Amino acid sequence: MSMKIGVIENSQFFGRTFWEFLDVIREVGIKYIQLPCRPGSTWSSGRVGTDPLYGSEELCIFPVEYADPTTLRPSLELKERIESYGVTVTSFYHNCEWMAALTLGDTQLDIEADRIMELCDIANKWNVPVIRASEGPAERHRFGYTKLIRDFSKRRCIEQVRKALQRCIKHAEDTGVYLALENHGVLLQDADELVSMIKAIGSDYLGANVDTGNFAYAGALPETLKGYYKTIAPYTLSTHIKDVQRQWDVKKPPTLMQRASAWGSANQRIVWECPVGDGDAEIKSFVNELKKNSKFRKIGTLNIQQESGDPRVARIDMLKRSFAYLKSIV
């Protein structure tokens, strides 16, 4: 069974509306997409509602007019319209706020678990097998990674993720929907730590959404990446495939906190994202490891993700080159 190649919805990066973005990927030849689960408009995005945890701007959204009025989540009408473009949703994209409970209290964990379980129900109706979940808020949110780690320690933050997953994994099993935990931010950026978390939960319905660029952002050099991929590939359910070219001296890399505070920043030139296959993220090595994972070949997708990039490379051209490279190695 050949691997599916898709893309994560990121219409704003391409300067397109959601529907124009579907036209772009259809023209490129991409038939699969990872769909965000927060509604918003193209230029002023964010969750519809008053919850302060969802008040910050989101790059990955779906059109607000296709939000279910009860849940504010993707409606079945949205599914039908996406499929009219010849595109199939193979996974949902969800940013969790699990670590905010360190500040707000454990009631927040219950709120976040309810959100995941609600998405499991929707994924079941959509026949979407995987929900990608991050382990905590992005740096731009009001509960930043670096502040939480300074205040509570990395060990306690990781324990918070474990507690959060335990609250919702049974419902994922009951609905037949897989949860894929991403190496995101500054936690779980070591493949052994990510696998340890998966094993600690002990469910076949928990695995990884491996972001190849994030491992590289966090300082992993090519030989380290190859080892990471061997470790994590058997547990991988979904992916974000992005390639990067490092901009720091390998003999004196920036600290983890320095990288987190300027995550992918063009001004800091920590890394440039580049067409897949042109950088240091050892994509072919990862794909070769994934070929051994029968579950991934059945339900997983190689989702191209573009969030920033070298301004010398036109963004649609970058997508075309990435897609062509992945087709050549699967």
Image (cartoon, helix red, strand yellow):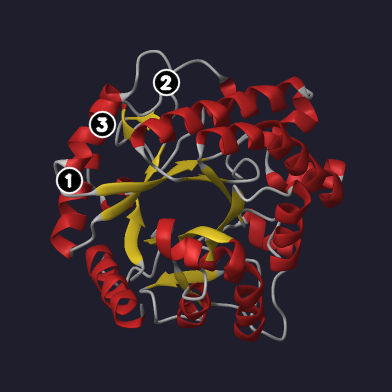
Looking at the picture, how far across and down is residue 65, in whole percent? 26, 22
Residue 184, by quadrant, is bottom right
Looking at the picture, how far across and down is residue 116, in whole percent? 56, 32
Task: Give the residue type at disc 3.
Answer: Leu
Q: Which residue appears at 85% of the width and 41% of the height? A: 151
Up/down of 254 relative to 68, above or below: below
Marks 3 & 1, CB-CB < 8 Å contact: no
Q: Which residue appears at 15% of the width and 46% of the height? A: 85
Mark 1 or mark 2: whose residue is earlier in sequence = 1
Q: Is residue 47 left or right of residue 256?
A: left
**Label 1 sits on residue:** 20
Looking at the picture, how far across and down is residue 246, in whole percent? 54, 77
Callout 1: helix, strand or loop? Answer: helix
Give the spatial CA distance, label 3 vs label 2.
16 Å
The foreground one among 135 and 199 is: 199
Q: Which mark is residue 78?
A: 3
The foreground one among 41 and 249 is: 41
The C terminus - image quarter: bottom left
The answer, for residue 112, to whether it is visible in the render is: yes
**Label 2 sits on residue:** 48
The answer, for residue 308, to whether it is visible in the render is: no
The foreground one among 28 and 103 is: 28
